[in-house]
Amino acid sequence: MPGIAAISQQIWDMKYRFKTAGGEPVDKTIEDTWRRVAAAVAAVESRPEDWTSTFYRALEDFRFLPAGRILAGAGTGRAVTLFNCFVMGTIEDSLSGIFTHLREAALTMQQGGGIGYDFSTLRPKGAPVKGVGADASGPLSFMDVWDSMCRTIMSAGARRGAMMATLRCDHPDIEAFIDAKREPGRLRMFNLSVLVTDAFMAAVDADAPWPLVFDGTVYREVRARDLWDRIMQATYAYAEPGVIFIDRINRYNNLSYTETISATNPCGEQPLPPYGACLLGSINLARLVVDPFEPSARLDPEALRALVPVAVRMMDNVVDASRFPLEEQRHEARAKRRIGLGVTGLADALILCGVRYGSDRAVELTEQWLGAVQNEAYRASALLAAEKGAFPLYDRDRFMAAPMVQALAPEVRALIAEHGVRNALLTSIAPTGTISLLADNISSGIEPVFAYTYERSVLLPDGSRRTEEVSDHAYRLFRERFGPDAPLPDSFVDSQSLSPAEHVVMQAAAQRHVDSSISKTINCPEDLPFEAFRDVYRRAYELGCKGCTTYRPNPVTGAVLAVKREEPAVLPDAPGNGAELHPHPLDRPESLPGETYKVRWPDSDHAMYITINDIVEDGRRRPFEVFINSKNMEHYAWTVALTRMISAVFRRGGDVGFVVEELKAVFDPRGGAWMNGRYVPSLLAAIGDVIEKHMKAIGFLAENVVPAGRPAGTAPAGSPFPGIQCPKCGQPGLQRSEGCDFCPACGYSRCG
């Protein structure tokens, strides 16, 4: 891959290069990968040889980027699906129906698909269950079952399964759903979104009462504005739940005459009916810019018009080429043949054209470019229908009346009226983090550039490490052309320096030309007042967005900014640094005061009980010993060793606050957990949190002071990616977007 960033080559080798079970590469070069995918997708044509080279040219130079499942699975012969995500069937409100769907979810994730579920069909907690004389446990209890199942299923490509759970804003358990992730470790495999109706938004405006209803029975009423504020406060604090404007989704659905949507795929860009499948691919806009950085810089319209129909044909062929975990999914996909063609590299394309993301000109170009993609995609699908037939559920009159179809260019509507259309829905914008990294680290989807350059540490075969610079595609082109000291023009703007309003207008501009939906995170500054934050969601609704997801860095969400290293402060009359350091460990008295704390770690079936006993010296308490007990014997040896070492340190006396610092700095390469709405990088770090809490409770450490060093799992001071460390490569800057973690250094990703 000459001329392509080293990180891109690594991503290809790790995620998309076809290898034997023994690890022997079958794809010798990236061109081999493109040939494999092109041949597999062309195989369903009546004359494959006529299309293989055409498909290859679309893939070449990363101009068209099929989603990762297609790149990794097409042409390998493996029993995996080429569809990224699914919305599962409607859950029947019975024990048999619930566990039938649990089995279907497991089978789908086993083949590599993420899933979405609407749990609004399950009766609320406390509702009577006829025939058994019991009360219902409610939808959240069954979501816990799904969460446990998901943790045990490894998706294809060694990635944990991702799930989306939705609940209607009028379900009686909606408040518990909103607050669910405040509980440590709960539902960590799910993204959560509230299905918000137009009637609810009107009730919020009027500050009207809002009934919570199930199966025609009103359980109670709340103030609509209070419920809205509860959603806003939760997402302000820890970035969930998201909001889906479900009536708008159904109103603008081309298939509203034959389906009702109540859930989305895990990242939200594909609202889908029961058993709907999500097939994704992206046009790389950055590769289509001519005369970059010149006054004449522009997106090549002819290149775009030539590329889109090839991409549509390829994706339509994948519908026939793919395996499906369930027969219901295969039937749904082939009955409607929906695809999700989108774009990536939008921010880089704007930079190459000298346009600032979020500006009026950026909004204008976004509408122009995505409008062209929309019209060309529908044109191509109409011509495919003339050749191969329209999708089976096509109804000319009702389809032509759909708002998105009415917005197409007149000549495109005429083609559809004459021939029908091959694909019921065609456009969507996905989070393209890993495939964008593969394509020479272009900006992702329609997101702004996260950071233009950063350092990553690469482990070499001999065990040593080499530091290399990773730079954004547009930034690297600028430096190669103008030199390392040239000042960056105004078009270089990153996600942290944009206002929430600039994010929203870009999402809204794109949504006007996307018939499905968009995966987009609206970055908000940490110090954004709550009232202004709440207005972001109202503005998204007013501008026509189909959903809204925000990210506001703060200690609750886990993205703690780097802090200056300082000595731990102690109370004026507490031992702390001035405590006596004993030359020999003290003998243990017969009895000691202490406390026992319960810690639940998501990956363990049993809780840990941490007992910390204190000694009293000169009327003051200080930690003396620690014991850790659990029914889980997996950790027995290291917990015994840990307690003996910590207790030995405590018995020496002096300033033992550093123990907290060392424990909280440990991160687990398998990934941490969200506890009390905050990211904890390891079980050891959780134990450190307990010890710190105890030290503050007895007055050994001041209540408002953290021990020396940076917060556990966060980046060192001065890092261009302030935030938590990647559990795979250890580099700082793990990004949180649409409920998924993504590492720009190594390409690691995990949703949920």
Image: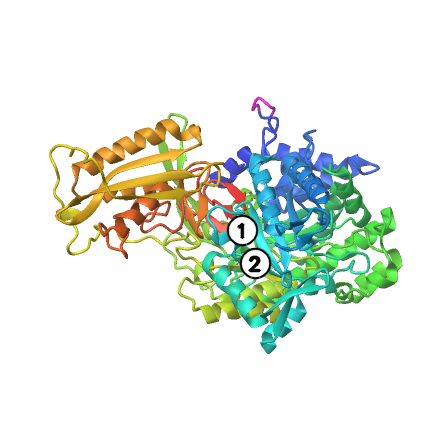
* Residue 303 shows up from this direction: no
What residue is shown with label 1? 739
Q: Is residue 333 left or right of residue 550?
A: right
Magenta: predominant secondary structure element?
loop
Q: Residue at x 56, y 67 (%)?
A: 227
Query: What is the image's colouring?
Result: rainbow
**C-beta proximity under 8 Å, tags 2 and 1:** yes
Q: How far across and down, in percent of the image, does residue 298 sit?
A: 59, 60
Label 2 crowd bin: few (<14), some (14–19), many (20+), radius 10 Å: many
Q: Is residue 698 left or right of residue 396?
A: left
What residue is shown with label 2? 242
Q: Is residue 531 above or below residue 424?
A: below
Q: Is residue 748 left or right of residue 731?
A: right
Q: How far across and down, in percent of the image, does residue 571 sit?
A: 19, 55
Q: Residue at x 65, y 55 (%)?
A: 127
Viewer-nearest residue: 274 or 364: 274
Q: Quadrant of residue 613?
A: top left
- Amino acid of disc 1: Gly
- Amino acid of disc 2: Gly
Q: How far across and down, in percent of the image, does residue 204 sit?
A: 59, 73
**For the residues marked 2 and 1, what is the alpha-carbon distance in whole angstroms?**
9 Å
Residue closest to the far front? 133
Viewer-nearest residue: 209 or 287: 209
Viewer-nearest residue: 134 or 631: 134
Q: How far across and down, in percent of the image, does residue 211 sit?
A: 64, 68
Label 1 crowd bin: few (<14), some (14–19), many (20+), radius 10 Å: many
Q: Quadrant of residue 175?
A: bottom right
Residue closest to the far top? 22
Q: Earlier in the sequence, mark 2 or mark 1?
A: 2
Task: Find the magenta span and give its range.
Answer: 20-24
**Disc 1 secondary structure class:** loop
Q: Residue at x 73, y 52 (%)?
A: 273
